[in-house]
Amino acid sequence: MARNDLNDFKRELFDISNNEFRKNGFTLSVEAERQMRELISAGVDRMSYEEMVNESDLLRARRNIIELSRRLCNIKASPRRIVENRMFTAARFRICPIWPFC
């Protein structure tokens, strides 16, 4: 996968994740958004490194980012419905492993 394609796929996955949060009435704090972008970036880089970038791999990554986002919403406990960075980190460790993100 070319570098531009990798960056486009990273943006696509972040948009999918962000849409899932919005659909469930949540927003990410600035720090949690940064962590989500880093998680996605590392996952896409892992896919490229492992040469797992065929259409079925891309579909699996799309499905898994939706699942990861939904699980973060379900774990989220604050009544403010904002995913804070420490909650994001704690939830991520409870959710993982979920390929290719962790």
Image: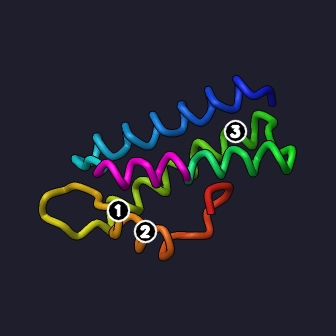
Could you tell me residue 61's position as x and y percent?
A: 64, 46
User: Sequence-wise, which precedes: disc 3 or disc 2?
Assistant: 3
User: Which quarter of the rendered picture does the C terminus lie within?
Assistant: bottom right
Give the prevailing secondary structure in the magenta stretch.
Answer: helix
User: Which residue is situated farthest in the left direction here?
Assistant: 79
Q: For mark 1, what is the residue?
A: 85
* Quadrant into which the N terminus falls: top right
Q: Which residues lie in the magenta part?
A: 29-38
Q: Amino acid at mark 1?
A: Asn
Identify residue type, mark 3: Leu
Left or right, 99 with reference to 54 = left
User: What residue is drawn where x is 50% and y is 46%?
Assistant: 37
In this figure, which residue is indicated by the disc labeled 3? 58
**Residue closer to the observer: 99 or 63:** 99
Q: Is residue 8 above or below residue 82?
A: above
Query: Mark 2 and mark 1 in contact (Cβ < 8 Å)?
Result: yes
Q: Is residue 96 left or right of residue 15?
A: right
The answer to whether the residues at label 1 and label 3 have Cβ atoms under 8 Å apart is no
Front-lying residue, 4 or 92 = 4
- Determine which quarter of the picture holds residue 83: bottom left
Element at badge 3? helix
Tell me the element at label 1: helix
Q: CA distance from mark 1 to mark 3?
A: 27 Å
Crowding at mark 2 (Cα within 10 Å: few <14, some 14-19, many 20+): some
- Secondary element at tag 2: helix
Q: Residue at x 64, y 30 (%)?
A: 7
Point 19% across, 56% down: residue: 81
Using the image, determine if residue 40 lies above or below residue 84.
Answer: above
Identity, as a three-letter code, of the amino acid under mark 2: Thr
Q: Which numbered dot is residue 89? A: 2
From the viewer's perspective, is the residue at label 3 or at label 2 nearer? 2
Cα separation, mark 3 vs mark 2, equals: 24 Å
